Structures are given as C-alpha cells and as structure tokens.
Amino acid sequence: MIWPVFAATALAALADDSCDAQIFLQSFATQERPAGIYDAGPVAMTNFAGQMPSAVSPKTSCSQTSYLPSAIEKKFKLNAVQLTKDRHVLCGALKGTTEEWLAMNLKKTPATSKSDIFSQICPGPMATKQVIEPLVGLLRDPRFLCLKKPELFTFSVDWLVLADNKSFPSTTSSNSRRIFFDAGGSRFVDALNFFVTKYEERGIEMDQIYVWEMEKKNASQYWAGTPEDVRAKWEPRLTWYNGIPVSINEGDMHNPVHRIRELCRMGDFCAFKLDIDTPKVEGALVQQLLEDHGHLTEFFFEHHVQSHLMHLYWLRDINFDQNFEHSYDLFSALREKGLRAHSWI
C-alpha cells in the first residue's frame, strides 16, 4: 500500500480547511503533467469500486479452468517495460481505454465476451464465466499519473471488478461460508471497511474475518474512525491477531495461506488481502498460493517492483530484480489457476 508521508499529508489536507492545507492541495492539483496527459472527462472518482456485474453477458458456463486476457492486456504484456517507462508513453497507451473502462464499471454496464478491455476468467468447470479488470499500466487506476484534474486518485478503487453473488451463486446458500483474510490490517477503516461493505453490496456478506497486524495496538486505535454501528456489526465476526506478524511456515496457524487451505471448503467464498509491505514474506506467500490456493476465490496484493514511475511511492520496499513484466506474469499465473487475483493499492 502507498502510505508514505505524501499520502498522509494529502488525506489530512482533504479534511482541513486551513490555509496551509489548501496550499498543499492547490500545489498537488497544479503539478505539471507531460504533453499528452489527458483529461479523463466526466467520469467521477467515487473510491467505492466498480458496479459492473462480474459475470460475462450473456451468462455462460465454463468447461474448464481458464484465463483469457483482453486485447489491451495482451498489448501491455508484450510491451511491459516500454509502456510503463514514463508517463507520456503510459498515458498515451491507456487513452481511450480508460474512459470506456471506468464508464462501464461505474455505470453497472455488463461486459460481453467480445470486450477488448475486460479479461475473462473461469474459476473451474461448470462455474460461471466471469470478467475481471485487465492487467495493464501500473496495475492501479488507469487515471493514476494521467489526470489534469486535482483528484487524489492515488487510492482510487474505481477500476476494480470484484466478484458478486451472481458469478458465485453458492454464496447465497445457508451452507456456504463467506470468509475474509486480512494480512496487514492496521485499522479497520483503512481497507477492511471497504471490502466488507463492497462485498455486501454485491450480495456477499462476510460472516468470518481474520486479521493479522504486526504492530500491536489497542482496540480503540484499530477501530478509530469507524462508525459505532459499523463496528457493532463487524467486531463480533472478527478475529484479530494483534501484534502478531504473518508466518510463511507451512502449517503455522499464522500463515494465512495455511489457514485458507484449512478453513475454506468447496462452495465457500474466501477472499484474501495481502499488504504487509515486506516483499520477501509476501513473495513466499504468493508462491504458496501458486502451488495450491485451495478454495480461495479472490486475492488482492500489491506487487512492489523496480519502476521509475512508482519509486516515490514504494520507496525501498520493492523487489529490486523485478519490473512490471514480472508483475503481469505473476498475476496472469494466479488467474490461470482460476483465482480472481487483483493488484491492490
């Protein structure tokens, strides 16, 4: 996750009417963009993710586990280094795609099997064929670094296409469990509130939540900023491993991949967000998912790699020997196994 001083200052400025805060926002809004950086048009940033159904229209059944990248994804995968080397090239390659992508996703427009933008995934035989956002650009909102407008788009999730109960009808069964695993949960309101709210909107209400956070804190710190009614709803369902780092050891109860394999059964809906900003540990856990992701349904992970465009945001917590070509390959490999794998912010 991008949480350096830059982000904290930006978020604080949004809630501050002081002169200094407004000067900060004005300077952010007027950052010089290279020639060719475009205006995204009328699509508003909501930071509440997309509304698009995750099932392909018309509804189609899968014959086997598979993944079909879209045309724009194939373009970026073939030219990963070239298309992500600077903002001018990046934004030029995304222009046109960005507007249609976000307009469809925010307006609940179903994607067809002929879409040049959205990729397709089959989680397994007899499953519903689904769409998922393409693996392109910097693996975040395609407006990132490309807008002339002053929105703080760094943390936008409008580009994501999450699963819903239409693509996973077993989630409506009383025998199905809906479990969320959060590795790196500093505060409920930072990310987990988004996930449980968005999934509930899409017909999947979590009934078990497991959270690991290495830095020990008291309950008031973890729930800070969370409305009382929201806390009252989710706290009884949440198991909080406070001050306990995740483990990469096979069979360890604090290895979230082990817990996923142990707890998640066929017909359950299980989602996992991995965000601990420690590449060595994250890499080991992702490798374990590649070997066997059990019955995990959806996965969120930010792969930190060497990138001129991202170095101010990721700083030193990166895989120095990898670039976005490796990121595309990694997420593709996970998706090819039927796992709805998303890049996170």
Image (spheres, helix red, strand yellow):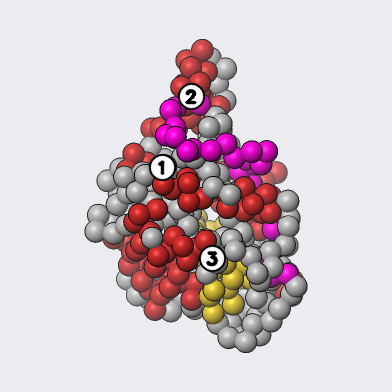
Q: Residue furthest left?
A: 321
Marking on residue 30: 2
First to last magenta residue range: 29-57
Calculate the distance from the C-alpha at mark 2 to the C-alpha at mark 3: 34 Å
Taking the image as shown, residue 267 lies to the left or right of residue 10, namely right
- Image spot of residue 174 (x, y percent): 74, 74
Tell me which residue sits at (42%, 55%) in the image.
302
Magenta-span inclusion, residue 43: yes
Taking the image as shown, residue 343 lies to the left or right of residue 79, namely right
Vertical placement of residue 101 versus 119, above or below: above
- Relative depth, front residue between 185 and 16: 16
- Tag 1 secondary structure: helix
Tell me whether the residue at label 3 lies in contact with that at label 1, contact meaning CB atoms closer than 8 angstroms.
no
- Relative depth, front residue between 241 and 308: 308
State the residue position of label 1: 87
- Image spot of residue 116 (x, y percent): 59, 63
